[in-house]
Image: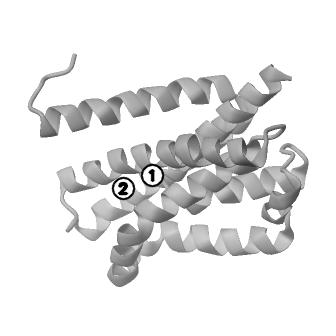
Amino acid sequence: MEMNILLNIIIGLGLSAACGFKVFTPLLIMSIASLSGDLELLEEFKWIGSYGALITLSVATFIEVFSYYFPLIDRLLIKIEGPTAVIAGSIMMASCVVELSPLLQWAVAIIAGGGTSAIVEFLSLNKLKVVGYELRKEYRFYLSSLTFLAALFFSLLALYAPYLSFLLSLVLIFKAFKYYIESHISIKVV
């Protein structure tokens, strides 16, 4: 029973980390996995595995991935990406964590799921600041494609190789803290 809870938390962490790259891609993968029977969701999250959610998440993912063609939409998405990534990461974790009391479920969801997606979002947003937001259109295409592929990779890895996904999530969290410490405190971390 404890191993099942641990495995579900690890899957939730991987999916939450994927939300830090692109918000809607992991939700779309979760919807597809639920509809195909590869992922069992809690009763209150069965809506993610509905055909309506699949269509909505497909459209949202398409808009999110191809927003670089529309600078106004791109800027809007960059502004709301952080809070929506935290919310999506919390939902991903809450939907994966079973056999816990609702209080503990949402505490784990908000702290671990929302926190993981916030850290990955912080890391990817700071990479965007490093290269400069006003990128030429062809570079924005590469950046958008790269983050989409990272979200897709992490989502599939979380579902089908959760322990590897967990290790990669830890690496990303370490890199985010290392980047923060080096850029704000001027200490070189090995």
Residue 22: percent from left, percent from top = 50, 57
Q: CA distance from mark 1 to mark 2?
A: 6 Å
Residue lying at 82% horizontally and 66% vertically, measured from the top left: 47
Q: Are marks 1 and 2 in contact (CB under 8 Å)?
A: yes
Query: Which part of the image, by quadrant, shows the C terminus?
Result: top left
Q: Quadrant of residue 119?
A: top left
Q: Is residue 51 above or below residue 46?
A: below
Mark 1 lies on residue: 147
Residue 171: percent from left, percent from top = 43, 26
Residue lying at 87% horizontally and 46% vertically, measured from the top left: 40
Q: Is residue 178 above or below residue 14?
A: above
Q: Is residue 85 above or below residue 73?
A: above
Q: Secondary structure at mark 1?
A: helix
Q: Nearer the viewer, residue 168 or 89?
A: 89
Amino acid at pointer 1: Thr
Mark 2 lies on residue: 143
